[in-house]
Image (cartoon, rainbow, N blue to C red):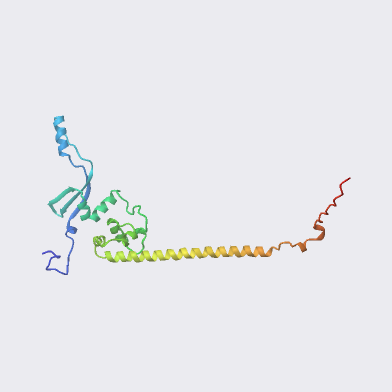
Amino acid sequence: MIASDLNNPDFVGARNPDDGLYKEFFWHEAVDAWASREASQKAQKRVVVKLPKAPYIRIMVPGDKTTEVVQAVTEAHKQRFPREWMAWQIEEGLIGGDGDIPGWKLSEWPEIEPDTVRELLHMRFQTVEQLAGASDKQIQGIGMGGLNLRERARVALRNKMGAETQSALAEKDKEMEAMKERLAKMEAMLQGVKLPQADDIPADVIPPKAERKQKEPAPI
């Protein structure tokens, strides 16, 4: 009986049986049997028509070629071997290691080891935000330590957001203090300037009031 059977309720020594398999993703141009037969009949000679290049997978028990299976990659293969599928895509340049997803890149998170970052990238986690918001099913795919990683990501995000908020508030305080200083200087300048009053102006400077011209009587 396997380790996860009823005789082993504590799952001592349990492991994923797929871990012992050899898995290889590769490009392959399969032969189109129908098209090849049609082309051979028309040309009266053997003609081989190949399908467009597509990803294939080779699975086998190491050391036993009789177990080798070669198939076109399906969604089932991608879900069954997510790490190997992600690693192959990165090697072939089909996707970027960090991608263009906005957020806090895992490679910029100083709290985890580079090996853990590479493993998470293979699992299609690219940012700390993705890891913090991962579902329980996604965390199960990470394996042991997945729950701890998710919680650490959540704590790191809270701390980062708190630090950014404090920094923004401090910057606002500096701006307010600078504005207060400018207003105080302007007020001091205005208080130092005395506007001239009428009593302060010399008499000879004040133009005399225009005398009212006496109206002469109209001639008879």
> Which residue, as the protein is rendered here, is positioned at the far bottom?
10
> Which residue, as the protein is rendered here, is positioned at the far right?
220
Q: Position of residue 13 (x, y in %)?
A: 17, 66
Q: Position of residue 59 (x, y in %)?
A: 17, 52
For the point 16% across and 36% down, which residue is it? 36
Q: Position of residue 196 (x, y in %)?
A: 73, 61
In the displayed structure, 178 sits above or below 64; it is below
Drawn side of residue 110 relative to residue 168, left or right: left
For the point 15% across and 34% down, which residue is it? 38
Q: Quadrant of the N terminus?
A: bottom left
**Number of numbered discs visible in the structure rendering:** 0
Of residue 177 and residue 150, the one placed in the foreground of this image is 177
Q: Position of residue 68 (x, y in %)?
A: 14, 51
Of residue 108 and residue 125, the one placed in the foreground of this image is 125
Quadrant location of residue 109? bottom left
Of residue 113 and residue 186, the one placed in the foreground of this image is 186
For the point 24% across and 54% down, which residue is it? 84
In the displayed structure, 50 sits above or below 184; it is above
Drawn side of residue 117 relative to residue 216, left or right: left
Drawn side of residue 54 relative to residue 112, left or right: left
Q: Quadrant of the C terminus?
A: top right
